[in-house]
Amino acid sequence: MGLFENLATAAPELFTIKTMILMMVGTMAGLVAGAIPGFTIAMAVVLVLPFTFSMTPAEGLATMIAVYVGGLSGGLMSGILTGIPGTPSSVATTFDGYPMARGGKPGLALGIGVWASFFGGVIASIVLMIVAPQLALIGLEFQPVDYFSLILFALTVTASMAGDQILKGLMAALLGLLISTVGSDVVFGLPRFTFGVDAAAQGFAFLPVLVGLFAFSRLLGDVRTSEKAHQRLGGNEAHAVHIDYLGSAREVIRRWGNIVRSSLIGVFVGVLPAAGSTISNILAYDQAKKTSKDSDKFGSGAIDGIIAPESANNATAGGALIVMMALGLPGDIMTAIMLGALLIHDVIPSPSFITDEPQIAYSIFLAFFVANFMMLFMQSFTLRAFVLVTKVKIYMLTAVILFYCSVGIFALNNITYDMWTLFIFGIIGFVIRALGFPIVLMVLGVVLGGIAEARLSQVFARSDDIMVFISRPWSLFFLLLGCFSLLFPYYQKHMKTAVWARFFVPALLIVQSIPVFMMPGIVRPSVAIVMALTGAVMVAYRLKNGGKAPEAEQINQTS
């Protein structure tokens, strides 16, 4: 059967009063869970799982998908209004969302975040329905060496996100990588950098570190003086806060290129097993900054800086669902839980799952699509309540936030060690902020350090040959892309004046065509040939014009 016939078959299973009510409750639960710092989406999905045992597979999965989508969007509320990401997948949203809120535009920032999440989810659901099996095969091609190269590429965002403070940015990222090595070695289980503290052998859990660096350190800065402590979170105009849905929708649609690009990045990262939205929202933010004409405004309340991470993290859910259904591989912890729910109902995902179980498969597609509309509707109510936070004075809000952060962090493992982690990294973050080091890049190192080490150990467990990093097409693709990513800030700075900058883009096309040509099949090698030819034509055109810098060429044309 075709796409529309399968959707018509699945629709009666999904569009029942009971299922719609369950999805609305699930969406609201996800929004609330995502908005509470320290309470992860995975925890919300786990809490919902036991209630799905008595449901049909379609009902149970639809409910969990609603929690998943709601949680991804809920994180933007606390991230934008308090500067504390409700979930790791909304880390990059705080970079511009919080400055915009503190600049007196919390309603606009929230509206942009909601619409970006919605469009990202809708685009991902369309991709999910059309090319699920084909995209899943790409995820099957990835090996540990490819993941490690992808993470190295993700780490190159330090170059563009550090701006003019490249040295401080690299130092902060390296400090984050060092923090991720504390604890037991991933290969032999031997303790490292514990300094005789037995509890430190377990390392530092990511969420206590994240909340400490982002929340505790920022709150300490906000209450440094009595004058700052008595200010309202939203400034003097906090009483006039309202969410302009039409205005924010226009701003988002006007930047449709950023939405599509960020959503596709999210889908692609979601297809890669165990990559997750924590990576995709940072990568999308980085690419948005690199391609923006106003990149200098990023970090101070840029609209594109909110659109990119929010559309990417919701789109990642679509990619993760593709891998779960087509290959039976969990793209992240949430889809791992959903995979368990399928197995409980004697439904086993496989490459033939979509054709063998079209009713369940397309029910999942439809549920993901519908959940994004429910999120848009339900969040309009939760935002109105959450936006009241902007009226509260900072010293009052500080006490409440620290209380809920502490409760959420303690609830992770029920150990006081996590509380000490929160406190220590809050102090470290406060000192680092005061010294002018970017906290964001330190968090990036902590997020990616553990993943990179695990993947690298898997690489060398298979072989000692380092040539595997350039013999594997995807690994070579990301390594070369990472090299150009490191050079991109210099290209962006000199693109209007330097001669070499004219050859940056064609060189990127020609160089990247090599790993694409090495990939299996007919389509990708054909694309590689087109890339190489395009790059060669661009080089020839620029050489014909004498290789002059754009400004020099414009002066000659004028004269």
Image (cartoon, rainbow, N blue to C red):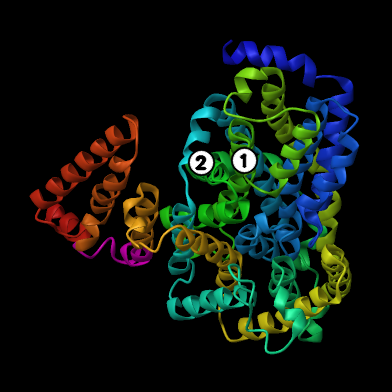
- 202 relative to 408, above or below: below
Of the numbered discs in the image, which one, if any, rests on residue 329? Answer: 1
Magenta-colored segment: predominant secondary structure: helix
Answer with left or right where residue 375 lies relative to residue 279.
Answer: right
Camera-side residue of 237 and 489 = 489
Q: Earlier in the sequence, mark 2 or mark 1?
A: 2
Residue lying furthest bottom in this view?
196
Query: Mark 2 to mark 1: distance in Å?
Result: 9 Å
Judge whether residue 244 can be spotted in this image: no
Magenta residues, start to end: 486-499
Residue holding disc 2: 139
Kindly identify the residue that appears in the image at 64 percent across and 18 percent down.
356
Disc 2 crowd, CA 10 A, few/some/many (<14, 14-19, 20+)? many
- Callout 2: SS: helix
27 and 76: which one is in front?
Answer: 27
Q: Quadrant of residue 91?
A: bottom right
Drawn side of residue 552 relative to residue 210, left or right: left
- State the SS at label 1: loop
466, 357: nearer the viewer: 466
Quadrant of the drawing holding the C terminus: bottom left
The image position of residue 128, as x and y in percent, is 58, 30
Estimate the x, y position of residue 494 in percent, counting from the top left.
29, 66
Q: How many marks?
A: 2
Viewed as shown, does residue 201 lie left or right of 546? right
Which amino acid is tagged 2? Gly
Q: Quadrant of residue 468?
A: bottom left
Tag 2–tag 1 contact (CB < 8 Å)? yes
Residue at 61% across, 50% down: 276
For the N terminus, the image quarter is: top right
